[in-house]
Image: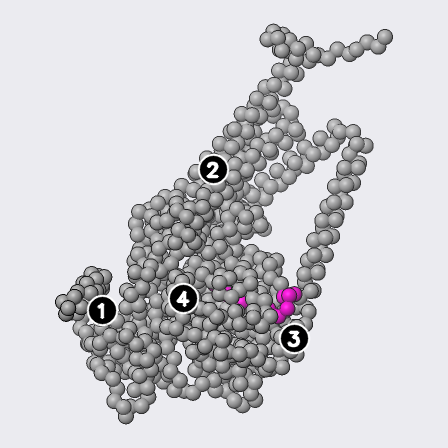
């Protein structure tokens, strides 16, 4: 008879069933203790993950709460826990918890692998967990401070961790060393484990795994290769591609006398037909792009403000609507949506943008945690933190290559002719992205603004990346390309305003404030509403519409002309838009000798939006601006979007400066309180003029034309003409403060008058 082998754990297992005690072996005791220490280590690791979250988030939370108590973030946070924005915030908090718990689990896993390599470490498992967690936390902070220099912690540690030790920075040495240690531990544990397993049993699984990995890589290559060549299909109509650059100053471009800062733009514009004098009716992104897409004036569409309520904007039909009806696929993309909420309702089949909503202001601005920076620009980051992925609004986390990779992945030109729009915003304030150096650069000359120059260079690099993507996808084998900006940017340079300290304005009895920085700030600063507009054709089909030859076309054009011109070029009716702009397609098709887009006396218009306030460093005082303007906005619980309050629209309209202008003259209406304007008639070249208290005489034809055009365009918004002195300033300030009280009293009196008459 075969004798059974004695199982040393048999008695232990069975005696425990009866509640009896027995002596266990040393191995059993050690195994039991090890499992207990592993459980303790797991709870410790998860607690450390949450502690890391609390420690790194304290600054962001404190800042957010401070701004919520003041007026600065009330518009965005007032409805934080209601409706759509509440759901977004809860998802964000859950994602943070999940990420940091996973971080703790990673430390625990590395500690477990360490015990596989060194069994003696089992006795000190919790210490090993703490050791790995501290190492990983140091690596994360080092990574954050090295690559995301403007985040909350990055600012504090960047200088120390950016110091060079040979070819690498200190921060790089730290996180690369931790990664190397983790990989070595993983490899060593895997090798030791495989040695303990009979190799013959592993041959089939290993071969299957290798085959599966090979299949994945081959498939990925095939799909990528297929996507890169399928876009080269020719269509009967050309693609229409609109490449927009935010806050672009023309004097930085070679075609306008610039020094070649924007090399990709300059190279692309060499063969483009440029309309040298083009303006926007409102120098803010949303009103300007609405005018671009509709061909209609903001006074017609109602798109006169950033964050205008969608129901108050009569944008449809748009250029995208008309092209879609003609068989085009329509795509809109941008890397920032905080103040320009364009979505599918504007006629687009596809939008490639960050999520739109008030949560963008909250979750984006206060999501600078070190652990987030590690994944923010990955596909996992897009899933967990969509408001931080490829979003230039979150400048401290934004990496241009993330947005470009998203375009590469999501945009296709395979399904027929395509309208593709992209708008790049790195040249907009605050002019930096995640890895922009903290050090203030030296000025190249007295008029140099280094921060703006860096922002423009970033936008230019992104522009080059977009053009390269279009070439790879075959889109530029048959396309009409429009290169444009939505508005300019004033930088307080001597040439940035019509009036300066030497200007003379007859009849003006008090100093006139000209806000010569930013955009949408002053109608007396033409650089704010002067924009780039160029057309270039690629391929024989597009060239049949017109052939771009690098011409300089004279003005004066407006962005309202773009949509009707494009429809005319592809032989589609522009009547559908009822445009206020004009098509200059015949000029583009004409011989090179014809260079005038419109007559010199064509009257164009522009107006301002809510003002932003300057900071001491020449930029924007974000806190002061938000505190002043937040009362104008509210959050819709249903959509989670921030909009201009309907009740504040009359005050916003009253605040506006307005101007009508030709090539030589400009008539400005500057508010002097809610019920009066100072009317300035200025000679743009002489940089001087006079104050008007009544309409110009009929015999002054050019001046009277401006006056009549302004009255026809703005109608009842224009108030009585006055001439004020400095003593009137306190009175005017009080009138603004009493705006709603006075109008409520007037409305009440108007409602009572018919009853009295009866």
* SS type, badge 4: loop
Mark 4 or 1, which is nearer the eye? Answer: 4
Q: Nearer the viewer, mark 2 or mark 4?
A: 4
Image position of 661 with respect to 752: above or below: below
* Residue 283 magenta: no
Disc 2 or 4, which lies upstream in sequence? 2
- Disc 3 is placed on an element classified as loop
> Which numbered disc covers residue 236?
3
First in residue order: circle 3 vs circle 4: 3
Q: Which residue is mark 1?
A: 673
- Splitting the image into 4 quarters, where does residue 466 fall? bottom right
The residue that disc 4 covers is 313
* Residue at point 60%, 33% (across, down): 109
Residue 52: assigned label: 2
If the image is split into quadrants, where does the N terminus sit? top right
Query: What is the image's colouring?
Result: one colour
| Among the two numbered marks 4 and 1 on one chain, the one whose residue lies closer to the N terminus | 4
In front of the other: 683 or 16? 16
Q: Closest to the observer: 733 or 613?
A: 733
| Quadrant containing the C terminus in the rendered view | bottom left
Q: Given this view, does label 3 or label 2 mark the residue nearer the observer?
A: 3
Q: Report the Cα–Cα distance between label 2 and label 4.
A: 46 Å
Please tell me whether mark 1 sits on a helix, a strand or a loop.
loop
Task: Report the span colored magenta.
Answer: 413-425
Mark 1 touches mark 2? (CB < 8 Å): no
Q: Secondary structure at mark 2?
A: helix
Q: Nearer the viewer, residue 568 or 513?
A: 568
Q: From this viewpoint, is residue 402 visible?
A: yes
Q: Is residue 627 left or right of residue 392?
A: left
User: Is the C-beta separation of discs 3 and 2 under 8 Å?
Assistant: no
Decide which of tag 1 and tag 3 comes sooner along the chain.
Answer: 3
Label whose residue precedes the other's in the sequence (3 or 2): 2
């Amino acid at each position: 008879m075969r004798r059974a082998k004695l199982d040393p754990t048999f008695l232990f297992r069975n005696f425990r069933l009866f509640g009896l005690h027995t002596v266990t072996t040393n191995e059993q005791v050690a195994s039991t203790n090890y499992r207990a220490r592993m459980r303790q280590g797991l709870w410790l690791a998860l607690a450390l993950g949450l502690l890391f979250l609390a420690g790194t988030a304290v600054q962001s939370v404190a800042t957010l709460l401070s701004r919520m108590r003041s007026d600065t973030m009330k518009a965005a946070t007032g409805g934080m826990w209601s409706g759509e924005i509440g759901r977004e915030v809860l998802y964000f908090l859950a994602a943070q918890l999940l990420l940091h718990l996973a971080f703790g689990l990673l430390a625990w896993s590395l500690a477990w692998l360490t015990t596989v390599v060194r069994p003696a470490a089992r006795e000190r498992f919790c210490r090993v967990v703490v050791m790995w967690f501290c190492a990983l936390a140091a690596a994360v902070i080092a990574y954050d401070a090295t690559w995301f220099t403007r985040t909350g912690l990055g600012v504090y540690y960047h200088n120390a961790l950016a110091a060079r030790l040979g070819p690498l920075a200190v921060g790089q040495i730290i996180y690369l060393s931790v990664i190397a240690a983790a990989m070595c531990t993983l490899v060593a544990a895997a090798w030791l484990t495989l040695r303990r397993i009979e190799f013959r049993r592993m041959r089939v699984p290993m071969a299957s795994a290798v085959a599966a990995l090979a299949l994945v890589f081959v498939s990925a290559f095939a799909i990528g290769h297929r996507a890169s060549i399928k876009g080269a299909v020719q269509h009967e109509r050309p693609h229409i591609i609109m490449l927009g650059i935010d806050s672009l100053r023309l004097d930085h471009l070679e075609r306008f006398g610039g020094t070649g800062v924007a090399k990709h733009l300059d190279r692309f514009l060499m063969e483009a037909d440029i309309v040298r004098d083009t303006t926007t009716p409102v120098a803010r992104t949303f009103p300007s792009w609405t005018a671009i897409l509709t061909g209609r004036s903001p006074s017609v569409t109602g798109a006169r403000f950033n964050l205008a309520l969608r129901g108050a904007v009569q944008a449809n039909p748009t250029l995208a609507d008309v092209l879609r009806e003609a068989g085009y696929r329509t795509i809109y993309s941008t890397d920032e949506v905080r103040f320009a909420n364009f979505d599918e309702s504007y006629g687009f089949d596809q939008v490639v943008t960050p999520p739109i909503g008030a949560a963008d202001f909250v979750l984006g601005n206060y999501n600078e945690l070190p652990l987030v920076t590690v994944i923010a620009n990955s596909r996992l980051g897009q899933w967990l933190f969509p408001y931080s992925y490829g979003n230039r609004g979150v400048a401290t986390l934004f990496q241009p290559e993330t947005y470009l990779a998203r375009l590469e992945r999501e945009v296709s030109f395979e399904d027929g002719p395509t309208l593709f729009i992209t708008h790049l915003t790195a040249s907009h304030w605050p002019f930096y992205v995640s890895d922009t150096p903290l050090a203030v650069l030296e000025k190249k000359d007295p008029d140099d603004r280094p921060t703006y120059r860096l922002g423009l260079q970033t936008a230019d690099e992104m522009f080059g990346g977009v053009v390269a993507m279009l070439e790879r996808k075959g889109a530029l084998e048959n396309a009409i390309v429009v290169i444009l900006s939505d508005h300019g940017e004033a930088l307080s340079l001597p040439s940035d305003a019509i009036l300066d300290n030497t200007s003379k304005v007859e009849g003006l009895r008090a100093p006139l404030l000209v806000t010569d920085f930013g955009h949408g700030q002053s109608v007396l600063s033409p650089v704010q509403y002067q924009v780039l507009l160029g057309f270039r054709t690629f391929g024989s089909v597009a060239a049949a519409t017109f052939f771009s030859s690098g011409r300089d076309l004279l003005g004066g054009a407006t962005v309202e002309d773009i949509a009707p011109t494009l429809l005319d070029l592809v032989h589609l009716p522009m009547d559908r838009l009822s445009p206020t702009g004009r098509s200059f397609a015949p000029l583009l098709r004409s011989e090179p000798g014809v260079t005038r887009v419109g007559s010199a006396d064509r009257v164009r218009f522009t107006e301002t939006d809510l003002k932003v306030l300057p900071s001491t460093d020449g930029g924007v005082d974000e806190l002061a601006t938000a505190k002043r303007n937040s009362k104008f906005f509210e959050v819709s619980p249903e959509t989670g979007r921030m909009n201009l309050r309907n009740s504040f629209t009359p005050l916003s309209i009253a605040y506006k400066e307005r101007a009508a202008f030709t090539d030589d003259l400009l008539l400005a209406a500057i508010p002097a309180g809610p019920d009066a304007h100072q009317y300035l008639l200025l000679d743009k070249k002489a940089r001087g003029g006079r104050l008007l208290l009544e309409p110009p005489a009929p015999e002054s034809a050019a001046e009277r034309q401006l006056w009549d055009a302004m009255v026809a365009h703005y109608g009842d918004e224009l108030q009585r003409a006055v001439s004020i002195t400095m003593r009137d300033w306190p009175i005017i300030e009080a009138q603004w403060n009493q705006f709603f009280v006075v109008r409520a009293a007037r409305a009440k009196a108007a409602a009572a008058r018919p009853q009295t008459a009866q």
